[in-house]
Amino acid sequence: MAEPDIDNPLEALLGYQLRRASAAFLADLAHTLDDLALRPTEASVLLLIERNPGITQSDLGRTLGIKRANMAPLAAMLSARALVDRTRPDRRSQGLQLTDAGEALAAEIAARIATHEARFLPDLSIPERSALVALLGRVWHR
Amino acid sequence: MAEPDIDNPLEALLGYQLRRASAAFLADLAHTLDDLALRPTEASVLLLIERNPGITQSDLGRTLGIKRANMAPLAAMLSARALVDRTRPDRRSQGLQLTDAGEALAAEIAARIATHEARFLPDLSIPERSALVALLGRVWHR
DNA sequence: TATTGTTATACTCTATAACTATA
DNA sequence: TATAGTTATAGAGTATAACAATA
């Protein structure tokens, strides 16, 4: 009763499939991080700082596709929650690194993301999965 | 100067690649539809109505993953712009179909989406592209 | 002059809850 | 009882513009 014979012409479009797949991933990730009081964007920022201690907010934003203006309140909140410390390599820049609490949280995030990813992977071999990831990367790097 | 040696551990994640690729597609599509005063969501609704005249708002929403509550103002606006007509198969349902102006706009949308998609496709053969679309469909259909 | 960080603001899309009218 | 449509509201993410401080 919920699904009559509906013809969806969007199903053949790459953009549509990307959007639906991305939305499904994001919703599942948000649920996965729910009890950590972290949103997907915040989690991604923590993982990037972990691998690049001292990174500035601007470089962080450029790497993840987040504008400076949106990065500012995000970094301020992670700092207020004592997950990141701020140093000043410059007198105009903010170098970010994880606190001990931030490190612990980043480890937990990484573990949860691993199972989250596995939950969504179709029956793909490792090389097939790598090929898919590389292919998607080529789609938007330009 | 904008890209030092930053290590991005997210690049190996399918969810991250999906999100970036999807965002790039969506932004390009929004720009493509800009002068038609249509947002991507509205354009997708028009294309679905075109292929399924008389479809109800609820079925539309179920097919595209848009909640009834968000579908209502969307349909009301398309109706106010005289792009869709509403009939009543039921006394509680709204059957939607395109007006002549809606049909003309749908044709223009379809043409623009075709070039928009082509702009983003990496060097893939037709079967490779189909395989990618099918694979993404399997990711979120569950 | 260009860049960093910041604030304010608006837009798009999504989510929930509550309500009515009808099946 | 369940479903269709509606309204109100909130949240997350993103966008632009403008500003002060610094390089």
Image: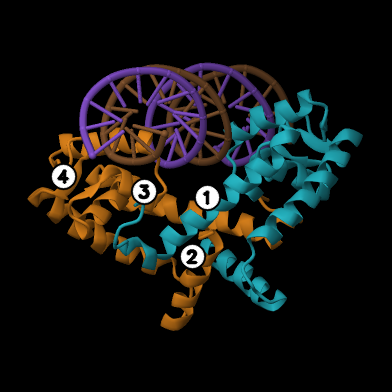
Chain colours: A cyan, B orange, C purple, D brown
In this view, B4 is above or below B134: above
* Residue type highlighted by circle 3: Ala
Chain of the residue on which disc 1 is drawn: A
Q: Is residue B11 left or right of residue B25?
A: right
Pointer 1 local density, CA inside 10 Å: few below 14, some 14–19, many at least 20: some
Confirm whether circles 4 and 1 share one chain. Answer: no
Q: Which residue is mark 1?
A: A23
Q: Is residue A95 left or right of residue B81?
A: right
* Residue type highlighted by circle 2: Gly
Question: From this viewpoint, which residue is outermost toward the left?
Answer: B100
**Residue A87, visible in the rendered structure:** no
A31 or D4, nearer to the observer:
D4
Q: Which residue is mark 3?
A: B30
Residue D8: x, y in percent? 37, 17
Q: Is residue B123 left or right of residue B81?
A: right
Disc 1 is placed on an element classified as helix
Disc 3 is placed on an element classified as helix
Residue B19: x, y in percent? 56, 53
Residue D6: x, y in percent? 27, 27
Confirm whether circles 2 and 3 share one chain. Answer: yes
The Cα atoms of the two marked residues, 2 and 3, are separated by 22 Å
Q: Which residue is mark 4?
A: B89
Disc 4 is placed on an element classified as loop
Question: From this viewpoint, which residue is outermost toward the right?
Answer: A100
The Cα atoms of the two marked residues, 1 and 3, are separated by 17 Å
Confirm or deny contact between disc 1 and disc 2 (CB under 8 A): no
* Residue type highlighted by circle 4: Pro
